Amino acid sequence: MDEILITLSKLDWSPLFISLKTGIVATIISFLLGIFVAAKVLHASPKVRAIVDGFLTLPMILPPTVAGFFLLLIFSLRRPFGSFLYENFDFKVVQTWIGCIIAATVISFPLMYRNARAAFEQVDINLLYAGRTLGMSEFTIFWKVVLPASGPGVASGTILTFARALGEYGATSMLAGNIPGKTATISQRIAMVIQDGDYTTAGIWVTIIVVISFVIIVTMNLLSGRGKHHTQTW
């Protein structure tokens, strides 16, 4: 116990703040893009839908290091696009917090997209017909009918997206590196201290991220359940 207290007193809390900031920003980006893309894909032809869906889902299936490799090919300063961004806009991705956000967004986006699309597909088509009968625009129907009706599915996607972005390691390590106080997230910190044999610090960080994830999931479940009537189950 004394060892844990001493370790806590000396703990660098920057990985927690970096992880939370990265998770929040990546979730917001994935939320907006996921909803937009999911709505667009629903109106595409089956062949186009299958191709786009497969492409957008790839980061969820491939190892994170593979996604990190492709991100390095795009944003490395030795590559045309990366050097163009840096030379013309002074915009650097590799070994920066922006790299953390991009990596976490790429890896977590498929969860938001898949859940949002599945939720939209479950919306009763009669609700859309009713909205059109009342003279509502397609934009208004989407935001006032479709999105509220698919709320639980979208909420689930948001939860999973944040959890995935919070714990992302592979792609983040390759693109953003592990710079203390700058790009070192909780997952990276856990890996580093385990390599050093510091299991006490690793255990503290593991406990922290487990508690955070559990609290977020419970809170979101309680919020999404508000206003729903209790139903008896057998």
Image: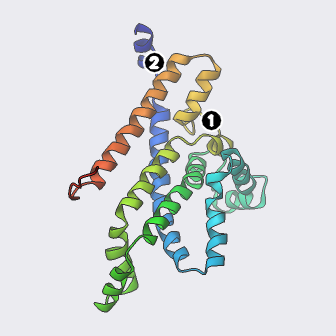
Identity of the residue furthest to the front in this view: 234
Tell me residue 94's x, y (percent). 67, 47
Q: Is residue 8 left or right of residue 194?
A: left
Q: Is residue 103 left or right of residue 203?
A: right
Tell me residue 71's x, y (percent). 69, 53
Q: Is residue 164 above or below residue 9?
A: below
Indicate the secondary structure of the residue bearing disc 1: loop
**Quadrant of residue 194 within the rendered picture:** top right
Image mark for residue 3? none
Labels 1 and 2 touching (C-beta < 8 A) = no
Tell me residue 139's x, y (percent). 39, 81
Structural distance between the alpha carbons of marks 1 and 2: 20 Å
Image mark for residue 10? 2
Q: Is residue 217 above or below residue 41?
A: above
Q: Is residue 203 visible?
A: yes
Nearest the eye: 207 or 233: 233
Look at label 2 and name its amino acid.
Lys
- The residue at the point 64 percent across, 71 percent down is 50
Q: Is residue 132 left or right of residue 60?
A: left
- The residue labelled by disc 1 is 178
Q: Is residue 111 above or below residue 148?
A: above
Look at label 1 and name its amino acid.
Asn
Indicate the secondary structure of the residue bearing disc 2: loop
Nearest the eye: 102 or 146: 146
Question: Which numbered disc flags the more N-terminal residue, 1 or 2?
Answer: 2
Nearest the eye: 205 or 93: 205
- The residue at the point 61 percent across, 67 percent down is 53
